[in-house]
Image (cartoon, grey):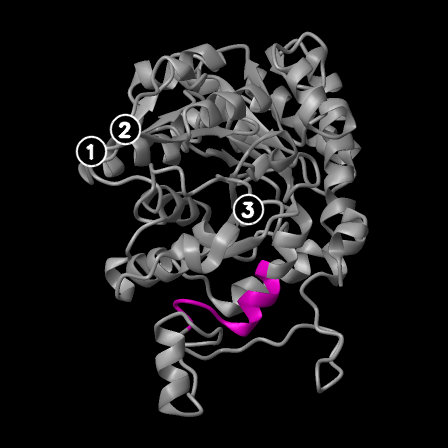
Amino acid sequence: MDYKKLKFETRQIHAGLNAQEPTGSRGVAIYPTSAYRFKDCEYAANLFELSEAGNIYTRLQNPTTTNYEERIAALYGGVAAVATSSGMSAIVTALTCLASEGENIVASPLLYGGTYNLFRCTLRRLGIEIRIAPTTDPADFARLIDDKTRAVYAESMGNPTCEVPDIEKLGEIAHKAGVPLVIDNTFGAAGYLCNPFDWGADIIVDSATKWINGHGTAMGGIIVDGGTFDWGNGKFPNIDGPSEGYHGLNLYKAFGNMAFAVKCRVDGLRDLGTCPSPFDTYLMMIGLETLSLRVRHEVESTRRLAEYLRDHKAVKTVSYVGFEEHPSHKNAAKYFRFDGCGPVLNVELVGDVDTTAKFVESLELAAHMTMIGDSITVVTHPASTTHKQLSEADMAKAGVTPTLLRISPGLENIEDIIADFEQAFAKALK
């Protein structure tokens, strides 16, 4: 079926299902297996030399996971998707398939704390330089690009600042340099709120743990190949060149516009072992069926909560892209549905770290966790959790202050959450 003809809400249910499934099962089966029987030695040899499609080992692929990957690719309109064990493993797998020792990636300064540490510490130890732009101005990215740059990287909506970069201009800058634009689209809800492919991105990574799953029951990440980048431009011999691991096979010549996704699977998953559990990808499939319904409710709740907090005496500032005064509102309105009214907001409370902690600890319905996109409302204190490992200077660059709270409304009635905030404020102020 040509899923491009279908609306998002239909694709999120039907894509990846096999209408000819022999058992007639409405749902996807879970295949809890590590390995697969080969019908003969020739077939096995063909699988291992990548000349024939099929299942080898669940570290590379699994029938349950394949259904899930097909659904994600259909939602984004990409040529292929590769599921991973977490959002971080998706980033690691994608970037190490793009850059090698001595090469660099130019990245946004507004990043999730775990991504920031991956860039500053782990990838640096592997010899891959991450050049963090001083601002999200595309011109600042352009000044850092040289002949050793292998990608431009940004988040569609920064975590936790919710700042939205100019994705289209970043794509133009990346393509002028002959490198792909990689976007972490976790806040874009699997393309429902934002689809960076529509604006020039070539590769998308996503923490499926968040809105894709939607219920806090599984970990997962996803890499989506848009199929638009020219891997034969001379900058990527690891894709358009002889592969050491497959007897000199040229992935670009063999797989065309799906070459990057294949690279992530046959080299990335094989060597890094970043594969997901088939049970987790089954849970992702279930979560996807209600994604649009959940996200619409959460976006509406976020606006209502932002309006309430903006007028509260215990709140110093409210950072919400749905407000016209937000510095990213124009970009958010351009790249995100619902006039840029995102599903997360940030507030700075009056007081200090201690009063902020008192407020968080006084909440009864909203949960204090390092999570977003869950079915329950989550309040996170980045300075003591997601960005705790950063220096004060790096926290400041990432937009994290001592009294900053990141709030991700869930599926509750928002009036109950507001009442919960009221009683917590009363205790904290007292």
User: Is 228 left, or right, of 151 in this rendering?
Assistant: right
Disc with the residue nearer the chain's start (1 vs 2): 1
The image quadrant that residue 96 belongs to is: top left
Closer-to-camera residue (344/242): 242
Closer-to-camera residue (2/153): 2
Q: Is residue 115 covered in magenta?
A: no
Quarter of the image that includes the N terminus: bottom right
Disc with the residue nearer the chain's start (2 vs 3): 2
**Above or below for 54 versus 277:** below
Disc with the residue nearer the chain's start (1 vs 3): 1
Residue that numbered label 1 is attached to: 102
Residue that numbered label 3 is attached to: 227
Identify the amino acid type marked 3: Gly
Give yes or no for contact between labels 1 and 3 (Cβ–Cβ under 8 Å).
Answer: no
The image quadrant that residue 116 belongs to is: top left
At 40% across and 37% down in the image, what residue appears? 233
Residue that numbered label 2 is attached to: 148
**Relative image position of residue 362 (x, y in whole percent):** 56, 31
As helix, strand or loop, the secondary structure at mark 1 comes to loop
Highlighted range, magenta: 58-69
- For the residues labelled 1 and 3, the Cα–Cα distance comes to 26 Å
Quarter of the image that includes the C terminus: top right
Give yes or no for contact between labels 1 and 2 (Cβ–Cβ under 8 Å).
Answer: yes
